[in-house]
């Protein structure tokens, strides 16, 4: 996990300890969300087989949600006076997501890999939600909203596996 740095602002919303713990939790979810958006584009480009068009387009809908979420999480870190770190090297070092397989993937494999990536991202968000309740209710609320959106997408992805 990237180290959260001291606030640059004169007026801090949170106490120093809560600010450091909160921004560290947000940062660890930020890198997952950035990685998830990249993974979903890889899936979008390389899906093959029956229902290609439906899955191809669905993946872009999920990407839109994920990109908005990463921007919201990054800017919450900013709001708390800390610089978010969305560099590719940081994402590669600290994302929890498994690497997406290389090359074309059948629809069934695509759905399985995308559902797994969504689930990993959701588990990390829910872990943060559990801790943020005592640290910062506003960041907790943000993570709840992000997780709710991803959980709905997970439903629509794994409903196709049934
Ligand atoms: Fe596209």
Image (cartoon, helix red, strand yellow):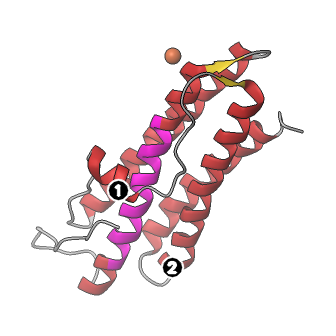
Image quadrant where residue 152 sits? top right
CB at disc 2 and ligand 1 closer than 8 Å? no
- Residue 23 seen by the camera: yes
Q: Is residue 54 left or right of residue 124?
A: right
Q: Point out residue 50 in the picture as x, y percentages from the top left corner.
A: 80, 15
Q: Are marks 1 and 2 in contact (CB under 8 Å)?
A: no
In magenta segment, residue 61: no
Q: Please provide percent x and percent y for residue 83.
A: 20, 59
Tell me the element at label 2: helix
Residue under the point 35% across and 50% down: 91
Residue depicted at 59% across the width and 67% down the height: 126
Tell which of 66 and 72 is nearer to you.
66
Q: Earlier in the sequence, mark 1 or mark 2?
A: 1
Q: Is residue 108 left or right of residue 31?
A: right
User: Is 159 located above or below residue 28 in the figure?
Assistant: above
Q: Report the disc number at residue 93.
A: 1
Range of the magenta residues?
A: 21-38
Is residue 27 on the magenta stretch? Answer: yes
Q: Which residue is mark 2?
A: 131
**Mark 1 or mark 2, whichever is nearer to me:** 1
Task: Rate crowding at label 2 as few (under 14), some (14 to 19) or many (20 or more) other CA atoms within 10 Å.
Answer: some
Q: Is residue 33 above or below residue 103?
A: below
* 131 versus 60 height, above or below: below
- In space, the residues marked 1 and 2 are separated at their CA atoms by 23 Å
How far across and how far down the image is residue 76, in percent?
34, 59
Dot 1 falls on a residue whose secondary structure is: helix
Residue at coordinates 72% horizontally, 33% vertically from top-left?
109
Front residue (pair 137, 112): 112
């Amino acid at each position: 996990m990237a180290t959260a740095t001291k606030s640059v602002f004169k007026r801090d919303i949170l106490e120093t300890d809560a600010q450091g713990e909160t921004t560290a939790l947000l940062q660890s979810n930020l890198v997952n969300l950035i990685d998830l958006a990249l993974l979903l584009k890889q899936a979008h480009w390389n899906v093959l087989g029956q229902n290609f068009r439906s899955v191809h387009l669905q993946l872009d809908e999920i990407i839109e949600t994920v990109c908005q979420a990463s921007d919201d999480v990054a800017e919450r870190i900013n709001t708390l006076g800390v610089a978010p770190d969305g560099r590719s090297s940081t994402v590669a070092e600290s994302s929890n997501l498994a690497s997406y397989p290389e090359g074309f993937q059948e629809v069934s494999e695509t759905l399985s890999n995308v559902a797994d990536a969504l689930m990993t991202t959701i588990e990390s968000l829910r872990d943060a939600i559990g801790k943020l309740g005592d640290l910062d209710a506003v960041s907790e609320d943000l993570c709840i909203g992000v997780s709710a959106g991803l959980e709905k997408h997970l439903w629509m992805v794994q409903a196709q596996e049934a």
